[in-house]
Structure formats: C-alpha cells, structure tokens
C-alpha cells in the first residue's frame, strides 16, 4: 500500500497485507485518519527481491 499526499509526499513503507481485502480495510482507515486528503494505492507484490509491484486499486485523491 502506498499513501500519496500533497502535505507529506509519498509513503510506501506500509506492511505487506495478506489479502486485498485487508489492504483495502487499512486504506479506509488511512483515509479516515487523514480525512480524505490522501490517495491510497494498493499494490500486488510481484517480486520481493526486485521490489516489482503492480497497482491493483487506487482510492481517494490528495487535495
């Protein structure tokens, strides 16, 4: 999961979630904490060694 904000930039140091649903729940918590002023991108990790990921879902928008 990656948080994108106009205030603090990009934060991609979140834990790896076992399912898309658990990542989506965490994204909803982040949106509530930041009052919708962030964009959350949920990724699927393809390769941990090379840090390859692909975006599965994008929620919210940084205002």
Image (spheres, rainbow, N blue to C red):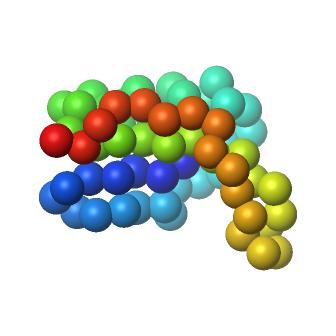
* Residue 7 showing in the rendered view: yes
Can you tell which quarter of the image residue 7 is in?
bottom left
The residue lying at 29 percent from left, 37 percent from top is: 61
Residue 26 on image: x %, y %: 48, 34
Residue 21 on image: x %, y %: 64, 24
Query: Quadrant location of the C terminus?
Result: top left
The residue lying at 42 percent from left, 41 percent from top is: 40
Query: Horizontal placement of 25 versus 37: left or right?
Result: right
Query: Horizontal placement of 31 versus 43: left or right?
Result: left
Q: How many marks?
A: 0
Furthest toward the bottom, the residue is 50
Can you tell which quarter of the image residue 53 is in?
bottom right
Q: Is residue 6 above or below residue 30?
A: below
Query: Horizontal placement of 52 versus 55: left or right?
Result: right
Residue 24 on image: x %, y %: 54, 28
* Residue 33 showing in the rendered view: no
Q: Is residue 13 above or below residue 56?
A: below
Residue 62 on image: x %, y %: 24, 43
The residue lying at 74 percent from left, 39 percent from top is: 18
């Amino acid at each position: 999961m990656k948080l994108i904000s106009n205030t603090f930039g990009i934060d991609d140091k979140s834990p790896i979630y076992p399912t898309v649903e658990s990542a989506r729940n965490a994204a909803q918590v982040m949106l509530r904490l930041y009052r919708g002023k962030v964009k959350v991108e949920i990724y699927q990790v393809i390769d941990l060694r090379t840090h390859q990921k692909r975006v599965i879902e994008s929620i919210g928008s940084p205002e």
